[in-house]
Amino acid sequence: MAEVVLKDIYKEYVEGIPVVQEFNLEIQDKEFVVFLGPSGCGKTTTLKMIAGLEDITRGEIYIDGKLVNDAAPKDRDIAMVFQSYALYPHLTVFENMAFSLRARKFPQDEIKERVERTAELLRIRDLLDRRPRFLSGGQRQRVALGRAIVRKPKVFLMDEPLSNLDAKLRVHMRFELNKIHRELEATIIYVTHDQIEALTLGDRLVLMKDGIVQQIGDPRTMYNRPANVFVAGFIGSPSMNFLDGKLDAENGSLWLDLDAFRLQVPPEAKNLDDYIDKNIIVGFRPEDISDKDRAGFASTGNVMTARIDVIEPIGSEELLYVSAGKHTFVAEIQEISGGTSEKHALVEKEIELAFNMDKLHLFDPETENAILNP
Amino acid sequence: MKKKRWLAKRILLGIAIALCIAWATFPFYWAITTSLRKPAETFTVAGLAIPFLQFKPTLENWAAELKVPENLKAVKNSAIIAVTSALLATMLGTMAGYGLARFQFYKIKNPDITIWFLSQRVLPPVVVAIPFFLLARQFNALDKVSTLIVLNTTFNLPFAVIIMSQLFKELPIELEQAAMVDGYSRIGAFFKVALPLSTPGLVATGIICLAFAWNEFMFALIIAQRNAITLPYIISGASDTRGIQFWFIATRALMAMVPPTILALTVQKFIVRGLTFGAVKG
């Protein structure tokens, strides 16, 4: 196992139009790093550059301390799991898994032993004689994983390996991947556009947009202390509410003026003086807004009245889509309506909501960078 | 009512199928029956010329034909030319097609190269017949089997390139990338993954090139004199100052028809596609 270092990676296909730029990252040994971002953000391109399947326009990539810019994929000692699985259709599952070992001229009995042990680990022993086309999606996924594991490479690269599975299987494979990562103590670089996958799997996330890294951090940091509006909106489901407001100073305390209502900024908030009397983006996660009666943190400075537009039950919680003045936002609260008829009766009624001001996020409207995180 | 219409449909369909079959098999029928008739009977027996009913079949045309050394030479030459040029065209076409499918060319863009190859196929060969004849004479290459191999390869290559590049384009590139990550070089990935997966298409391309070369007449006509004669060449030779000798045309046509037919029937299963099915996604 090994560490991977990316230094000032820059990639363009057409001159002057960067696909990836200023990419700097040091991946520790045994770390599970997730490249996250919307489609077309350059995450798969970056992964393929690490694999050696794409050239780098500028920058340096080190695997295990060795510069690999010009090394062929086969000389980088990496294994890759493709989104499409890319199983060799003309070979059996056994031969698919043995393929890389045969390429490296392993002795016959070691190939057999390794393939069988890996098949055991992934519970695909019964499938070894079959061709890929006779396997289900989940089985193919396991074979693809097995093909990567069997070689014990320095680094695993995974390109959206779960995106072709149905929702239930995906959750299960997520759990299996976590387990495999622990068992193999492997360095894994994982690409996904699914933030839940990223949050559940990654030791560290790299969130990208338009080829530029937006933030690098562990899942908790990314969730609680997003660097900018994009990160705040991308991570978390349902995503963070953004409200356009103004910062006012009054009698020694700061207030957020949101036209229809006002919220008092907690006194601990620092470095906001530059923004007084200026526009500001206010961010709240849905779970930090609650109905007044049940919120322990409700006070005069954080309660407002909103009109309920839609109620969406999501199991134990409910999503309340509400509007107040020009603002619409979502609150995630404990069930307030018992049944369907009650639910319908509540729609278009008013409700008093309290904002948990300790969880307030503020962003600069120009740069969209965070100026206050909890 | 419904049943009546269904019946009418079936009958019409049956007639259509019968017509198609008649259209496809009549040349065989004509050649076989004509080859079994005495020369004079090829003119006198009319209509469908049903053996035993309208004439007594005889093998004397065949016996006479097989004694002619030119005929055997033509069969041998046709086989050598067709097989060699088909192998060459398929081999070169596979490599060029792979290059065209997998690599980006900048000076002359990929679509332009494709069009260039295509234009070679569209070009009427007769346009270059005279220049080729002059070239061949200049290099002392008239009446040589090797010259015909080169010419047939030249004219079948564009077809092979285009078919093969299309085949490789349809092959998911991830399969080769996976092979490269798994420990093979680009060429290794080509031989281990891309080539085995395109075998059905490869065989089909080879067969079609073989058929083109086997049937080729014009180049044989201008290049061959005595040594490099081919089957189509001697079929046309059955028409001379004595008139058209239908009995010889029939025997020679059968000699030309039977081998490709047998070949096509034996390799049929290769031409069936779908081997790559299940390579990607669910």
Image (cartoon, rainbow, N blue to C red):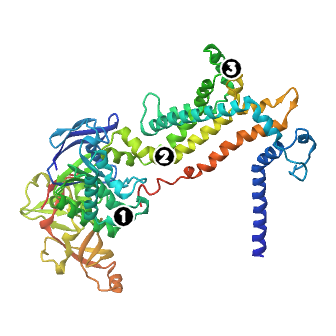
Q: Residue at x 43, y 60 (%)?
A: A133
Q: Is residue A371 left or right of residue A16?
A: left
The reply to whether label 3 and label 1 mark residues of one chain is no
**Residue behind mark 2:** B198
How far apart are the alpha carbons under marks 1 and 2? 25 Å
Describe residue B31's horizontal placement relative to residue A296 as left or right: right
x then y, percent, for residue A188:
21, 53
Give how far across and how far down residue A335 sits, in percent. Answer: 25, 81
Q: Are marks 3 and 1 in contact (CB under 8 Å)?
A: no
Please state the chain letter of the residue tagged with numbered disc 3 in the rendered image: B
Note whether residue B111 is visible. Answer: no
Local SS, label 2:
loop
Q: Residues within 10 Å of mark 2 (few under 14, many from 20)?
A: many
Foreground pick, A26 / A219: A26
Quadrant in which residue A192 is drawn: bottom left
In which image quadrant can residue A68 be found?
top left
Residue type at mark 1?
Leu
The answer to whether residue A120 is left or right of residue B121 is left
Residue A351, placed above or below residue B121: below
Q: Is residue A26 left or right of residue A129?
A: left
Rendered position, B90 above or below A244? above
User: Which of A81 and A247 lies nearest the eye of the viewer?
Assistant: A81
Residue at x 25% of width, y 64% of height: A121
Q: Which mark is residue A127?
A: 1
Q: Earlier in the sequence, mark 2 or mark 3?
A: 3
Q: Nearer the viewer, mark 3 or mark 1?
A: 1
- SS type, badge 1: helix
Q: Nearer the viewer, mark 2 or mark 3?
A: 2
The chain letter under disc 1 is A
Would you name the residue on which mark 3 appears? B130
Real-space Cα distance between discs 3 and 1? 63 Å
What mark, if any, has residue A233 been given in the picture?
none
